[in-house]
Image (spheres, rainbow, N blue to C red):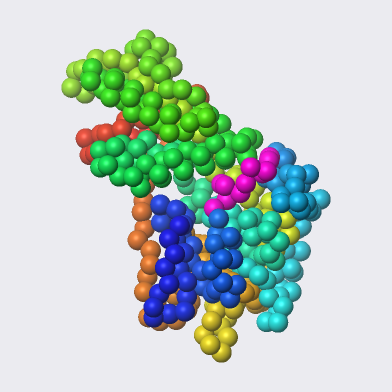
Amino acid sequence: RLWQRHQHTSRLTLTCGSLVGSSSCVVLSSHLGLSLLRSVSMISARLAPWLGALGLGAGGGILLNSTKEQEGEHIVLAASVPSRQQQVAALSTSRPNQPFDLLVIGGGATGSGIAVDAATRGLSTALIEREDFGSGTSSRSTKLVHGGVRYLEKAVFNLDVGQLKLVYEALQERRDLLDNAPHLTSTLPILMPCYKWWELPFYWAGLKAYDLIAGTRNLAWSRYLAPSESLRRLPTLAENSHDGRSLKGTIQYYDGQFNDARLNVALATTAAAAGAAVANYVEATGLIKDANGQVTGVHCRDKQSGRKFDVHAKVVVNATGPFVDQVRDLNGKGVKHAIVASSGAHVTLPEWYGAPGVGMIVPKTKVRACLELLAL
């Protein structure tokens, strides 16, 4: 998490995550102070060990267990999630003298996670999304819950302690997410094919290090598979490489897999059950400011009914991912864009290209890119 106060404005900027295109959020106002902003900006995957998984509804259920205690206080959840009509009505109740503690713009994974975190801490919270929950980047991921094998390689060869810490933290988060939402996650074995003899000990050692960094929270130990076993697990695996080298075997390791769209919806419904006012198809059309130019709310439009209303809040968080600058442009001309988009390519293939319940990774291709084949 990177905090930076711009000298030429009164805004506080927060960037979460390593992929700017999928996890960007900007705090547009800071009435509650830095300590509160630190608490409400926690990413959803690490909500706390007391998170459990309840329900298997089409949207993913609710991810909070209201029978547990957090620091001596019960978390009370609604018996059912209020309807969208009720949620929009709740959004409309705020006033300049009765604002929400926190308003989140963007109902993706980051925005929904912030709303869960804030609502369960007792803050009056509002969340608006101009499309449907998870309709953007959050439903277009590789659907892996991983620590980052490639980041580990960079950490070793570049002697980068920061990359090593990133891998360690991501592996802890991986275990947290699989424990918090077992109905939306699974463990996926992934094969790394080797066509040169030196690749076997090289990748074996690297993936063993990957296991060791996870420690007691490792999913399963990596191991070597002979060519025959590798082809049995993944029949479409090439027995010979493009340059005629025969398959020497594969190294099998394990990472997590999850339903990204359902998890996103589950976070949104959890926030609503915890008391947040949450509504999709509500668009932010403008920013409300006080006499000092401080952002104190948002002009909204219900895209289903066409009705316009205002939502007032002490803190406004722009968690719209790659669309962050579109919302920042509502602040007026002269706003310097902050986002440099990153991208990845996903190709959907017929299921016979792979095998059920197993994936494959080619760590380095001709164009120096990593290629992953995953069964969904």
Majority secondary structure in the magenta region: loop
In-front residue for pair 79/102: 102
Going by the picture, which residue comes out furthest to the front?
A: 72
Q: Is residue 112 above or below residue 370?
A: below
* Residue 222 % position (x, y): 42, 22
Instruction: Give left or right: position of 200 versus 107.
Output: left
* Residue 279 % position (x, y): 66, 62
Please give the name of the residue rendered at 56% of the width and 46% of the height, measured from the top-left corner.
45
Q: Is residue 326 visible?
A: no
Q: Is residue 303 above or below residue 352?
A: below
Please give the name of the residue rendered at 62% of the width and 74% of the height, measured from the top-left corner.
314
Instruction: Give left or right: position of 95 versus 251.
Output: right
In-front residue for pair 124/4: 4
* Residue 348 % position (x, y): 43, 37
The N terminus - image quarter: bottom left
Going by the picture, which residue comes out furthest to the left?
A: 243
Q: Is residue 67 visible?
A: yes
In-front residue for pair 318/260: 318
Q: Which span of residues is magenta-colored?
A: 43-53
* Residue 325 % position (x, y): 43, 68
Going by the picture, which residue comes out furthest to the top?
A: 228
In-front residue for pair 51/349: 51
Instruction: Give left or right: position of 172 versus 251.
Output: right
Q: Is 179 included in the stretch rendered in magenta?
A: no
Going by the picture, which residue comes out furthest to the bottom?
A: 291
Q: Is 47 included in the stretch rendered in magenta?
A: yes
Q: Is residue 10 above or below residue 114?
A: below
Residue 114 image-quadrant placement: bottom right
Count of residue discs: 0
Please give the name of the residue rendered at 22% of the width and 39% of the height, measured from the top-left corner.
367
Residue 155 image-quadrant placement: top left
